[in-house]
Amino acid sequence: MSMEEYRISIGAFEGPLDLLLHLVRQAEIDICDIFVSEITAQYLSYMDEVGTLDMDKASAFLEMAANLLYIKSRQLLPKPEPEVTEDGVPVESPEEQLIRQLRDYEAFKEAGAVLEEQYIEMSDSFCRLPEDIPLPPQRIEFKDPSLNQLIKAFRDLMDRAERKKSIDRLHRVRPDAFTIRTQLKTIRSKLKGRKEAISFEELLSEEPEKMEIIVTFMALLEMIAHGEILLRQPAPFEPIRIMEKKLLNGDAGYTYMDEEQENAE
């Protein structure tokens, strides 16, 4: 079968390397043998159609034709000494450069064909998007939270209080509005008879001052030391909740102070 029967319009090729690779595959020769074959003549025969292409594409085909003719002429002349750089590295000859470009182009073309096959194969496939399936929260209860956890909760409350309150440029000396004794009384009244635990914030006023938070926290520490309250934390990093501890027969050796004794002191 002659070459004319295989002929394809030059416009069907993506560029000169695409045409050259087509001719090599059609002739069934190794890429290294293109300079001792009829590939150059076959390539030049396509140049009759260059006028049908746009200027940029036509110039690329003509540049490759000139390069093939130059390499072909080198085959007819005595082989020159290989050139080297100042560092002694051999300089790539025009033949080696063209073979490397053709092999690289062939590798990319084959990889593109594989990707195109995969794209066509998967174009009719539809994947179900992953769904978030929330698991029920695990209830973790700490009977005795560590001191570090209490201090962290205290610092968080202090930071929030500082952000809510503007900075007072004048230092005002005022009498203590909160004492440990008054806060103990407030906490006991809020916890008394409650079946559910409450948070630390519920022990404070709507917009607590810094001193109220500090004194309330110290009052809680005193109640913890005497075994008067229990702390609960439903899950890690959640707010610590407080509830009254029911003392049986003077448990922990602690007795409550009534209001008359408190006022007498």
Image (cartoon, rainbow, N blue to C red):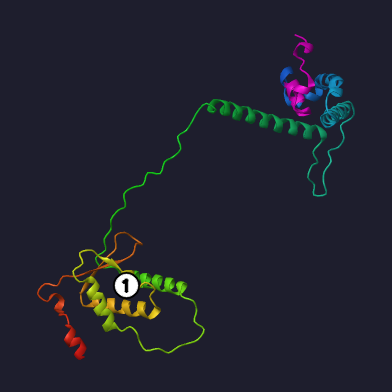
Residue 117 vs residue 218, the one in the foreground: 218
Q: Quadrant of residue 256?
A: bottom left
Residue furthest to the top in view is 1
Q: Main secondary structure of the magenta part?
A: helix
Residue receiving disc 1: 147
Q: Where's residue 261, x and y in %?
A: 17, 87
Per the rendered image, the range of residues in magenta is: 1-24
State how many labels appear.
1
Residue, x 23% and y 63% (percent of image)? Answer: 196
For label 1, count other residues whose C-alpha is less than 10 Å away and answer few (under 14), some (14-19) or many (20+).
few
> From the image, which quarter does the C terminus lie in?
bottom left
**141 relative to 46, above or below:** below
Left or right: 148 with respect to 126?
left
Left or right: 233 with respect to 40?
left
Q: Quadrant of residue 8?
A: top right
Residue furthest to the left in view is 249
Q: Where's residue 106, x and y in %?
A: 69, 29
Left or right: 72 with respect to 8?
right
**192 relative to 68, above or below:** below
Residue 73 vs residue 162, the one in the foreground: 162
Residue, x 31% and y 77% (percent of image)? Answer: 216
The local secondary structure at tag 1 comes to helix
Magenta run includes residue 8:
yes
Q: Where's residue 238, x and y in %?
A: 34, 62
Residue 188 vs residue 114, the one in the foreground: 188
Left or right: 152 with respect to 142?
right
Magenta run includes residue 133:
no
